[in-house]
Amino acid sequence: MLSPHDSPKDRLRVGLNAHLLSLRESYRSAGVSRYVRSLLMYLPQMDDRLDYLAFCGDARVQPAGWRTRLSPWNTEHPVTRILWEQVVQPWGAWREKLDLLHAPVYVGPVLAPCPIVVTVHDLSHFLYSGLFRPLNRAYLQALTRWTVSHAAHVISDSQSTRSDITRILGVPESRITVVYPGVDEGMHPIGDRAEIESFRARRGLPEKMILFVGTLEPRKNVLTLLEAYALLRRDRRFAHRLVIAGGKGWYYERIFARAEQLGLRDEVIFPDYVPQEELVLWYNAADVFVYPSLYEGFGLPPLEAMACGTPVVVSGSSSLPEVVGDAGVAVEARDAEALAQAIAELVQDRGRHGLLREAGLARARGFSWRATARETARLYHCILGDGQADGS
């Protein structure tokens, strides 16, 4: 399917694999899907000197400023998508005479007719391989390694991930550029408390609330969060309820089993997947946001919480201190006692709560999807010969 406008002949052609953009209300709509969506939204706005082509798997994806090619294959199924990526995509790139192809999620085609830039969001499939299903792990490891070693350039979400790519995959830092993800412009403090209270009533949420948002899977370290909350609930004066929001990923059953073992079945709220358009309300309704993930290439949720004025507690692992800086509290990832103490201090010390709220708002203003798109377009030009990618 070709969008109504023909490709201008005097502009260099850049293609983007948008097949992992999910419009479903599930964990697949988080993380990398939002990264792809934001590139589609902002790249033409930030730089209209290129001719942009999106390879799409959903006919509803019709981004402004892009020509689109719709695959007749249902690439929501992983095996089908892999076949499309490795067989159909390179043919499409050749037919479209692309000058550059952007693989925005780890993997590009082994046989590519043009240079590739690849975004590596993290290396959890290497560092925490036991938390992945075997076939998924094997594919990601093999194809990520191949793609980064043959790509014209690599984008990473953070300095932490950049270091991991060099250390684990042997890619020189000069071939890796850090381009930070951004915060959606809809993430902001809501001053109308009536709107927040109405939302609480609709969702059955408590007035005093500790929030986690993320895919329910082992790397997010929700088990330690549950253990920390169990420690807090030993003091019956601790009135805050824990809300663990997110779609079910892999091995999520362990989380519900642990909540049952700790006697928290009636104390913890599991609302499942939260639609993107509602997230701002969830963050604003929370008193504290907690994100104890074992490993993140960036970690959007704590940044979004800060943009909404909610103080955050994160683990001191991987990129999270890089993202949060001094605007949040960082503790050792698997230390339930330290996590419980950090939460308790923020809940009880309203002066510190207010200081971190203001610091978080200031910190979050330094990240935007417009800047992400601007830096990505700059890198395209460098690879295409208009400049020099310096790995900064």
Image (cartoon, rainbow, N blue to C red):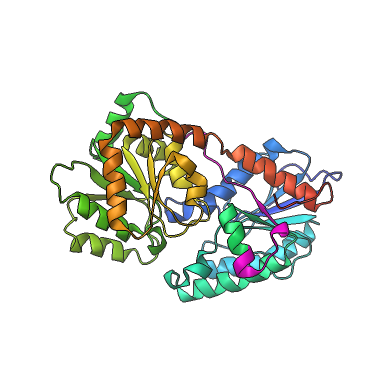
Q: Residue furthest right?
A: 10
Q: Residue furthest left?
A: 236
Against 195, residue 227 (above or below) is below
Q: Position of residue 225 (x, y in %)?
A: 30, 55
Residue 136: percent from left, percent from top: 50, 71
The answer to whether 353 is drawn above or below residue 156 in the figure is above
Query: Is 316 on the left or on the right of 55, as rendered?
Result: left
Across and down, in percent, residue 22 comes to 51, 52
Quarter location, residue 110? bottom right
Residue 271 seen in the current view: no
Q: Is residue 178 magenta?
A: yes
**In front: 292, or 300?**
292
Tell me the residue at 57%/46% (across/down). 181
Mark count: 0
Residue 109 percent across, percent down from the top left? 68, 67
Magenta part of the chain: 166-188
Q: Residue at x 29, y 61 (%)?
A: 255
The residue located at (17%, 52%) in the rendering is 266
Would you say 222 lies left or right of 206 here? right
Look at the image and say whether residue 357 sits in the magenta stretch. Answer: no
Residue 229 seen from this side: yes
Q: Nearer the viewer, residue 55 or 141?
A: 141
